[in-house]
Image (cartoon, helix red, strand yellow):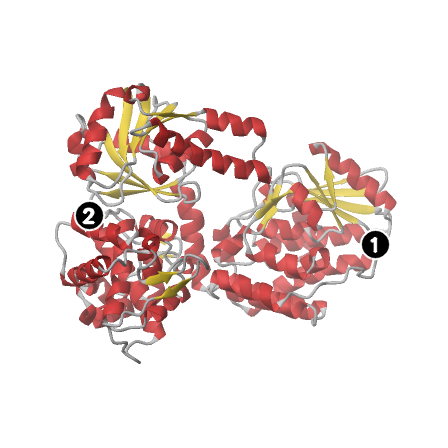
Amino acid sequence: MDENKPSLQQSLFHIERDNLQIVTISPLSTVLPEQLHIVDYLLQFADLVTSTLQQEDTTGVIYYCPIPAGKIEYIPLFNQFLPSDSTASTLKSLILKVLAWKELNKPIVSIFTENCTDIALATMLWAGYRIAPQKLKFGFPESKYGLFTGFGSTIYLPSLIGNSATLNLLTQGKLMNSEEAYKQGLIDEVSQQQDEGILLAKKWILRNPLLISEETQQIDQVSPEAILNIQRKTRGLYPGTNAVVELVKKRASSTPIQAIEQEVTLYLEVLNRPEPLHMVRTLYYGVQDAQSPSRIRLLNNYSLKKIGILGAGMMGSGIAYEAARAGIEVVLKDVTIIQAEGGKAYSTQLCEKLLALGILNQSQHEQLLSRIKPTEKVDDLNGSDCIIEAVFEDFPLKAAVTQESLPYLADNGFFASNTTSLPITELAKAAHDAKSFIGMHFFSPVDRMPLVEIICGKETDEITLEKALTTALRLNKIPIIVHDGPGFFTSRIFFNYLLEGITMVLEGISPLLIEEEAVAAGFAVGPLAVLDEISLELMLHVYDQFPALHASQQRAYSYLKKMVDQGRKGKKSGAGFYDYDIESKKKTIWKNPTISLQSNTLTPPTIRKRLLHVMALDSYRCLEGGIIDRPIDGDIGAILGVGYASYTGGVFGHIDLTTLPIFVAECQAFYAYGEQWDVPESLKELAKQNFKFYNGFLSNWH
C-alpha cells in the first residue's frame, strides 16, 4: 500500500514548488473522493506535507484547506466511523503525524479562501500560521447536533486561544467572522484582498525560517462556573458538549500523546451514540430539505413584491419586520394609525439594536424601515401579492378582516391566516376563493423563531401551497406542511404537554418537581411556566375552540377555570401556577392548599417520560390521521416550534430512541392517568413488528 501513496497523493493534491523552494499544496478535486475514508484521505495529505518538509531544500510549506468547500458532509462520518480498534489507531496515527511536523522545524502556513467549519477548520489549525481574507466565517457548528470536531481541535485550540475560549468555541455552535477570529487568535493575519494570501504566506515563511519549539502562551484554567453555564444550557444531554468539557478539563494535566488518546476515544464514542445522528438528521438534513427551492415545482410566474399584514400586534409586527428585512414592501394595517405605527416601532427597536451591534449600518437601517408603511386604510393594501391576517384568535373578527381586505389582493395573490388553532377550512369560508386561502402559523417572537407551519385547508390548491412556501423561504423561515385539524400539529401536541403538566398537578405531584424534570428532560420551558406566559384565559379560549373535550381535558379545563376565577390568570396578573414579585421580578412556584402533595408517587425519570411520551404519542396520531405527511416534519416542528428535547431528534426520533415496543408498553401503563394515553391499534401492530420510523437518515414511513 505504501508504494502506491505517491501516485495517489499526486491524484489528490496539486503540488507547486517555486524558486524560493516554498511548496504550495492544494486539493485537486472540488469534492472529497467517495471511495476514500476521510481519515485515509487526510493521512495522504499529512504524509505529503511530511515528505515535503523532510526534503532538505524545502524552505516551507503553504497549504490550502485540504477538504474542498471548507466543510464536510455528516453522512459519510456516520457511515465511515465504526467503533473499532483499527479506526481508533488510524485516527491516532493521523494526529501523531501532524504533531510530528513541528519536529521538522520548518514554517507551515495555511490559507483560507472560503468559509471554513468543522473538521476542515481543524485541519487548518495544524499549520503554524493562518491567513484569511476578510468577511469569511469560521466555527464549529456541529456542537448544535450533539457532536464535537476532534481531529486535534482540542489539542491545538487551547494553545492558540486558551482553554476558556476553546470551550466556548467548541460548544456554542456560533460562527465568527475573519476579524473576530483574528482578535481571538484563531487567525494570525487578515488579508485585504482575496489573492493576497499567498504573497503574505511567502513573506512570513522567509521571515520565520525556524519554528519556535517551546510553547510561550500560558494556557488558562477554565472556571467551574464556566463549565456549569455550558452544562446548564445543554442539561448534560449533548454527548459532544460533554466530551469537550471532559477533554478541556484534562488538557492541562495530559501529555500530547495522552491528549490524542483521550480525544480519539471520546470522538468515536460520541459519533457512535444514537443522539447525534438523530439531531443531524432533523436539524441539518431535515432543515436543509425544508428550505430547498426544489420544493417549488409548479410555480413559475409568482412575484412577491408587496405583503399586506392585518394586525400590528406582536405577531403582525414581527412578520412585518421579517418581510422588510427580506427586501419586500410591507403594508402594516390596524384599526387606527396609532396602533399601526406602534407595530412599526417594534421594527425600529430591533433595527436600533442591530445598529448598535454593528450588524446593520445607518443606510440599511433606514432602507429596512422605509419598506414598512403603517396604515389604518384598507385600500393601502391594494396590489398585495400576499395578505397575512394576524389578528386575535376569534372567528367573527378574522372573517370580517378577511372579507374587508380580499378585494385588494393582486390577481395572482393569496391570502394567509396566521392562527394557532382555528380550522383553516372554516376560516376559508369567509373568502370568495377557498383554493387561494391557506394557514401560515408563525411563532413568537417572529424575528427569532425560524419555523412556519403552513396549513392546507380542504380546498387549498397546490399553487397556493407553493406560493406560501415561496413566501416562507423569502422570509428565511423553515416551513413544514401540515393539514387542517384542531390545533394543526405543533399547537396540538403542545397542548398535550401542557395537559400532562396540569394532570400531574391534580395528581398531587409537586409543581416544582414537574417543572424541574421538564427542563431536565430537555424541554425549553416547563409546562406550568408556559401556561403562565400564554395566560390561563387564553388556554381556556383555545379549549373552547375544540369540537369536544375528553375527560382529562375537561378536568384540566375545570381546574384552569377555578384558578382564573380566583384571579390567578398567569404572569400578567401576577399570579398563576407561579407567584410573581413585581419589585424583585422573581417568581416562586405556587402550592395550591386544596391539593395534597403525594410523596413518592412518581419518580423523576417517569415524570420526564410522561412529558416526552405524551407529545410523541399524539404526533403519531397526527401522522396516522394525515395531519402531517412525514415523520421529519413532525420532528422539525416539535423541536423548532415548541421546544421539544432536541437531543432526541424530535418526537419520532424519541420513539426510535426508546424503541417502539417499550414506548407502547409504557404509554399503555400510563393510561390510568387519562385518555391522552390511549394507544392507537395501528401503533400496537407496528410495535409487534419492532418498527422504526427511520433507518439511519432514511425514513421508513410510506
In the visual, does 346 lie left or right of 612?
Answer: right
Q: Position of residue 444 (x, y in %)?
A: 37, 44
Residue 188 position in % (x across, y down)? 74, 46
- Is 349 situated left or right of 224 in this image? left
Please, what is the three-letter code of the amino acid marked with disc 2?
Pro
Left or right: 542, with 583 as reference point: left
**Residue 153, located in which quarter of the rendered image?**
bottom right
N-terminal of the pair, mark 1 or mark 2, is: 1
Q: Is residue 630 left or right of residue 253?
A: left
**Which residue appears at 84% of the width and 46% of the height?**
59
Look at the image and tell me whether residue 238 can be seen: no
Instruction: Name above or below for residue 119 compared with residue 235.
Output: above
Residue identifier under label 2: 486
Type of the residue with mark 1: Leu
Residue sitting nearer the eye, 595 or 510: 595
Q: What element carries label 1?
A: loop
Name the spot of residue 589 as percent of width and height, x first. Answer: 36, 66
* Number of the label disc, if any, that sits on residue 211: 1
437 over 125 or under it: above or below: above
Q: Which residue is drawn at 14% across and 56% down?
A: 549
- Which of discs 1 and 2 lies nearer the camera? The answer is 2
Q: Residue at x 81, y 50 (%)?
A: 107
